[in-house]
Image: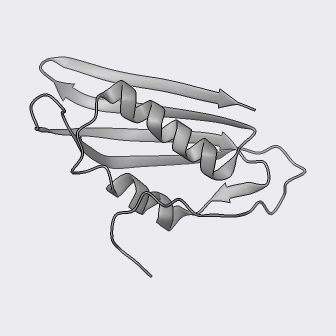
Amino acid sequence: MTTEPSKDLETFPNPKPGRDYEIVFEIPEFTCLCPKTGQPDFATFRIRYVPDELCLELKALKLYFWSFRDEGHFHEAVTNRILDDLVAACRPRRMWVEGDFFVRGGIHTVVKVDYAA
């Protein structure tokens, strides 16, 4: 079992594919780098989704979020990329991703994106 950062997202079969229910994750330790200055950016990510046939596996999700720590990303781009990657991995009925970035230069940024099948 790996503990290295990875962009590989794993899934498992939804135990109740005939029922709409919501799964919620909060990732309070997201880190990436500012693409302009190279300084670290910190954020809390919130993910909500209604699964279809597949659910996201949590350890792989943790390693996926960890994989951004040494990469430069604009807040808007990384939040949209995360949504795109998660949707590609589990093909949910609906998904919402929120990146709540810490204050930088006196500005607090929140980026919210969503997907509907």
Residue that protrudes farthest toward the bottom in the picture: 1
- On the image, the x and y values in percent for residue 107 come to 21, 17
Nearer the observer, 101 or 73: 73
Is 84 located above or below residue 64 in the figure?
Answer: above
Q: Which color scheme does this rendered protein use?
A: one colour
Is 10 located above or below residue 51 in the figure?
Answer: below
- On the image, the x and y values in percent for residue 42 come to 24, 40
Q: Is residue 64 left or right of residue 97?
A: left
Residue 117 sits in quarter? top right
| Residue visible at 52% across and 48% down in the picture | 25
Residue 96 sits in quarter? top right
| Residue visible at 73% across and 48% down in the picture | 51
Q: Is residue 37 left or right of residue 49?
A: left
Residue that protrudes farthest toward the top in the picture: 107
Nearer the observer, 32 or 44: 32
- On the image, the x and y values in percent for residue 97 come to 52, 34
Q: Is residue 3 left or right of residue 106?
A: right
Q: How many marks?
A: 0
Quadrant location of the N terminus?
bottom left
Is 9 located above or below residue 83 in the figure?
Answer: below
| Residue visible at 29% across and 28% down in the picture | 74
